[in-house]
Image (cartoon, rainbow, N blue to C red):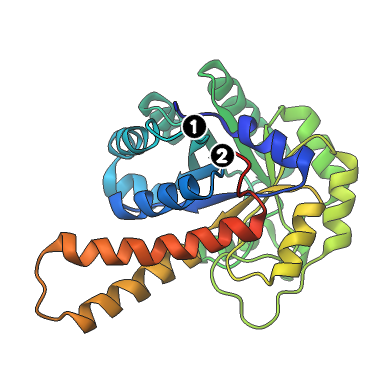
Amino acid sequence: MALVTLREVLLPALREGYGVGAFNIYNLETAQAVLQAAYEQSAPVILQATAGSLKHAGARVLAAMVRALAEPLPIPVVLHLDHGESPAMVAECLEAGFTSVMIDGSGLPFAENAALTREVVAMAHKAGASVEAELGHVTGRAEDADKRARLGITDPSEAFTPPEDAARFAAETGVDALAVAFGTVHGPYKGEPNLDFPRLEAIHRLVPDLPLVMHGGSGLPLPQLRRAIASGVAKVNIGTEVKHGWASALRQVLQEHPEETDPRRIMGPTRDSLKAIIAAKIAALGSAGRA
């Protein structure tokens, strides 16, 4: 089927209490792995590309590839820009055919973030696409530390999303989904994750009809993942598990078959190993059978 918007997959997830996986893709085989896993489990799915992936492959190439792979499948598929850096990058993706975009103004003061988000919402809605924004910010990357420094934040918990601000932000921007910070991190966790569920639950109470987004969904214990979904999280970002799973599978193939030089015989088994990882995550999110 044709690509769909973020709202089309997240609103049913929010109402029915399951999560939709948003998996970062980097090339043909990672896109195939995600789509094949989702198809076999009859699950809605979000394929997302970061700014780095746009620089690596180009928005038009990524959009054309995903569209060609997704259109024969009878499942809802969203093509989403993850951590969009500017309105210009958003415009590039919308022109290429992305059906959803994220504008990341989380390193800005509230008023500037809201103004930037309103600009992107107007642009994307005119193109028939959905918008995700971020309030507060998730830590873990070098750029996340830069955001904290610009905002004068010394304790990561100071970057958590204030519930009242989330309600105000949603009302002022008309955003379709909101990424909130409550203790998850980009990248691998160092020790047991310590998540502020009362904060997440308070945000959900104030904006019960707004799908919330959890960045840093890789590696969370299943009980924490399910509690987040029960507290309003409808979109769960999975990047680290995709990258680490891909790299681990590729190393294994090369070690077991050092004589192999055909990229198809190297990438095929790597893709299939990654597909199993994606399938397990879809099952954990509760989205299997929801297409």
| Image quadrant assignment for residue 265 | bottom left
- Image coordinates for residue 240, horizontal then vertical, percent: 49, 66
Residue 95 pos. (x, y %): 39, 24
Eyeballing the image, is 132 above or below 232? above
Q: Which mark is residue 103?
A: 2
The x and y percentages for residue 87 are 49, 32
- Secondary structure at badge 1 equals helix
Q: Is residue 111 left or right of residue 87?
A: right
Q: Quadrant of the N terminus?
A: top left
Quick check: can you spot residue 116? no
Q: How many neighbours does mark 2 have within 10 angstroms: few (below 14), some (14-19), or many (20 or more)?
A: many
Amino acid beneath label 1:
Pro
Residue 278 position (above or below residue 120): below
Quadrant assignment, res 164: top right
Relative height, residue 151 to residue 249 (above, below): above
Q: Residue at x 28, y 66 (%)?
A: 269
Task: Please name the amino acid that badge 2 sits on.
Answer: Ile
Q: Are marks 1 and 2 in contact (CB under 8 Å)?
A: yes
Instruction: Write down the residue under mark 1.
Output: 87
**Depth order, front residue of 276/241:** 276
Residue 286 visible in the displayed image: yes
For disc 1, the neighbor class at 10 Å (few under 14, some 14 to 19, many from 20) is: some
Residue furthest to the top: 126
